[in-house]
Image: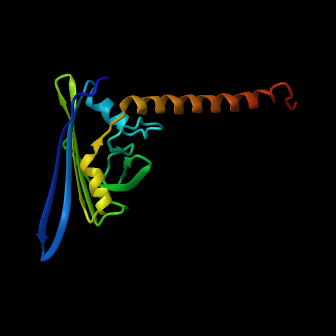
Amino acid sequence: MVEFPIRFEKMWTNCIYESIFIQYMVTFSQTAWFETSKEELINTLQIAPFHLKMESTPIVHYHMPEGTATGATVHYHLVAGFNRISWTGIISSSQNNQITTRLGKGPFRGFNAKHSILNDGHLSVCYEELSFQGEEDSFRTEIEKARILYGLEERKKTLKMLMAYESKKKTKSFESLDCFGSSTAG
């Protein structure tokens, strides 16, 4: 699976909404292409990675819930060095290959995200747009340098580890039942 080059767009805006001045609203968008099917990409994004390789640039990563029904929770993280900011988004809409979320819990006054995953021939295209309101200056500084890290290989390794653990757990429970096999009531 190959992750193709990513296009970044970051935009700082000042806006007036209903006579309230909101300064430094940040919008972060990114587009990425993957050599995988849309369905496999969505399934992989539902796995929270156990381990991610950190780089010198801050990263944003998230994992989707198993179902993309309205009201489900998406978990987001910004990691910059040893600092980590986490927040949740609540799915407010899921239709036509687009998932829209709004702030659940987090250190902002407002948060909205749009996740679009489309097929483009043999590739999947993932378009992300994240908007924040009321963030701290330190967050704004880090998000300006950040990129979304999908970590598909790390997510797949996590799935293999979880499956191996579950298999081992079931094997142990069968072994404990088997020790009672020779002493049956009769």
Q: Nearer the viewer, residue 43 or 52?
A: 52
Look at the image and tell me whether residue 71 can be seen: no
**Where does the C terminus fall, quadrant-wise?**
top right
Locate residue 116 relative to residue 170 in the image: left or right: left
Kindly indicate the quadrant of the structure image that contains residue 32: top left
Q: Residue at x 16, y 23 (%)?
A: 121
| Residue 183 image position (x, y, % from top left) | 86, 28
Q: Is residue 71 above or below residue 173?
A: below
Instruction: List the single residue furthest toward the front.
Output: 56
In the displayed structure image, the side of residue 138 where residue 157 appears, left or right: right
Q: Is residue 31 left or right of residue 103?
A: left
51, 71: nearer the viewer: 51
**Snapshot quadrant of residue 37:** top left
Residue in view at x 24 percent, y 50 percent: 144
Decide which of 113, 109 is in the foreground and name it: 109
For the point 35% across and 39% down, which residue is it? 56
- Asked if one can make out residue 7 in the rendered structure from this viewpoint, the answer is yes
What's the residue at 35%, 43% (across, down)? 61
Residue 47: image location, x then y, percent: 42, 38
Q: Position of residue 96 (x, y in %)?
A: 18, 43
